[in-house]
Image (cartoon, rainbow, N blue to C red):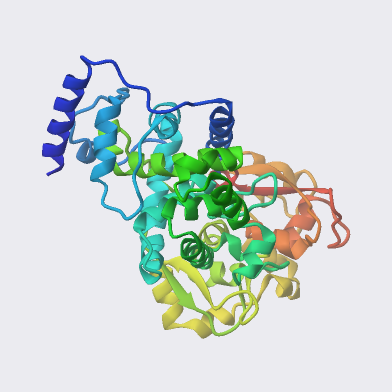
Amino acid sequence: MRQYLFILSILLLRVSTYAQSTPIGPVGPACDKTLAGVDTILEEVKLKYKSAVNYNREALNTYGYQESDIPTFNDSVIAYRMKLIESPIPMDYNNYVKAYVELYSQRRRESVSKMLGSSNYYFPLFEEILDKYNLPHEFKYLSVVESALNPNAQSWCGATGLWQFMYNTGLNYGLVINKQVDQRKDPVRATEAMCQYITNSYNQFGDWLLAIASYNCGPGWVAYAVRKGGSNNFWDIQQYLPAETRGYVPAFLAACYVFKYAPEHNLFPAEPEINYAVERVEIDQSVSFYQLSKALQVPVIELQKLNPSFKKDIVTKGYTAEYVCLPQNAAVKFSGNKQSVYSVPDVNYTETASASEVKKEMMPAAATSTKTNAEPTKEDTDIPVQGDYKKVMYKVQSGDDLNYICLRYNCDKWVIMKWNNLLSDNVYEGEEIKIYVPKENAN
C-alpha cells in the first residue's frame, strides 16, 4: 500500500511541475519569528545519543535514497498526503504549514532524526495514555513542538518538561512540584495532565485546532479571538491570537506530516540512549538512586535518564512517587527481591565504613595510589584525568548538599572530599566541585 501511494505521489509531482505553484497563504514576520523560536528549541535538544548514525537505515530506506538526498515535493503532493492521514483533527495544508514542513524536512534534519529515535521510546507510552482519554494519537506530536522530546527542556519563562507546563498550570492539573520532584518532567504524569488539558479545551471550543491553540496561549486568548473574529475556524481568527500561537498550530500539523512521511523525506531515526525495554515498578518504601544502582548494577546516570522528575535522585514513598522506571532486566531483579535493594546502605551512611573499605569500593581504579601510604595524596587525586576518567567541574546550586552530589555522580562523599581537599562536607552555592567520571558519562 505504501509503495502504491509513493508511485501515486510521484505521478502527482510530475504533473504538478508543469504548472506554477499556487500561493496558499501569506507568510509574514510573525511566522518568521515563530520559526526562529522553533529553530532555537531544536538546537537545544538535550537528549544524548550513543551514535548520531541512523540505525536500521538499510531496512527502512525502501525508496533507495542516498544518505545525502534531501527530497522535496510539490504542494499538491504534500496536501494529498496530509488528507490521507486518518484523524479527526483536520490536516489542513497551506503556506503557514508549508513553512514548518520545510523547517523539519530540510533545515533541521539531524534534529528530526534524533526525535524519531526518541519517539520509539516515548510515543507508545503517549498512545496508551491518549487511548485512555479517547484522544487522537496525533496529539503525541505536540511534544515535538513543545520540547523536541526532551523531558528536561525548560523555556525562558519557566515552562518545563515534555509538555512544557508552567508552574501554576502544572499544579492545577495535579502535578507535584517541590524540592524533591517535578512531575512536569514525568512522562506518565505530565502526559496525563496534557490529555486533561486538551479534553477540557475541546469541550469548551468544540474544535481540535482551537484546543491546540489553547494549549499554547490559554483558553482566554482563544475565547477572545473567537468573539473578535466571529468564527470557530482557527484560520479565520488566527490574526487575533498571539504571534507564537499563529505559528504553533501550523508547526503541529507539519510535525504530524513529517513524522508520518519521514521515510519519503529520507528521514530515519538516530539511535537514542534509551533503546531497550523499560518497565515501571512499584516501590514499597523510600529508596535512593544510589541504592538502586548498587543493588541492580544500573549506573546512576542511567536511572536519571529514565526518571527525570526526581530532583535529588531519591524516590520517597507517598511523597514523590509510587513507582520508578528501570531497565527490564533490572525491573525483574528488583521485583523478585525488593528487600535486598532497600537494605543496601544509603550513601548518607557510607562514612561508617573504614577508609580502606570506602577507598577500595568507590574510588576509580585510575585514582588509586601506587604508593604504600593508606590514603591518596593531593597528587594522586589528579590521576583520573588520564585513562578512562575525565574531570568535570560541578557548580553547586541553591539547595545542593554533598550527599546530592554523591548521588548525582554515583561517587562516595569521602572520595569527593579528598578530590577537593575539603575539611568538612559543607558546600556552598556557586562553589565548583571537582568530580572524576567515566569518559562516556562526562557530558
| Residue 183 horizontal/vertical position (percent) | 60, 65
Residue 308 visible in the snapshot? no
- Residue at horizontal 86 percent and vertical 55 percent from the top: 428
- Residue at horizontal 65 percent and vertical 46 percent from the top: 155
Residue 378 visible in the snapshot? yes
Left or right, 435 with respect to 361, comes to right
Left or right, 79 with respect to 389, comes to left
Q: Is residue 330 above or below residue 5?
A: below
- Residue at horizontal 72 percent and vertical 58 percent from the top: 405
Q: Is residue 156 above or below residue 170?
A: above
**Foreground of the two, 432 or 254:** 254
**Foreground of the two, 400 or 340:** 400
Image quadrant occupied by the C terminus: top right
Q: Is residue 131 above or below residue 228?
A: below
Left or right, 181 with respect to 72, comes to right
**Foreground of the two, 100 or 395:** 100
In this view, the residue farthest toward the front is 230
Left or right, 9 with respect to 395, comes to left
| Residue 271 horizontal/vertical position (percent) | 38, 44
Q: Is residue 192 above or below residue 42?
A: below
| Residue 94 horizontal/vertical position (percent) | 38, 33
The number of discs equals 0
In this view, the residue farthest toward the right is 423
**Foreground of the two, 159 or 379:** 159
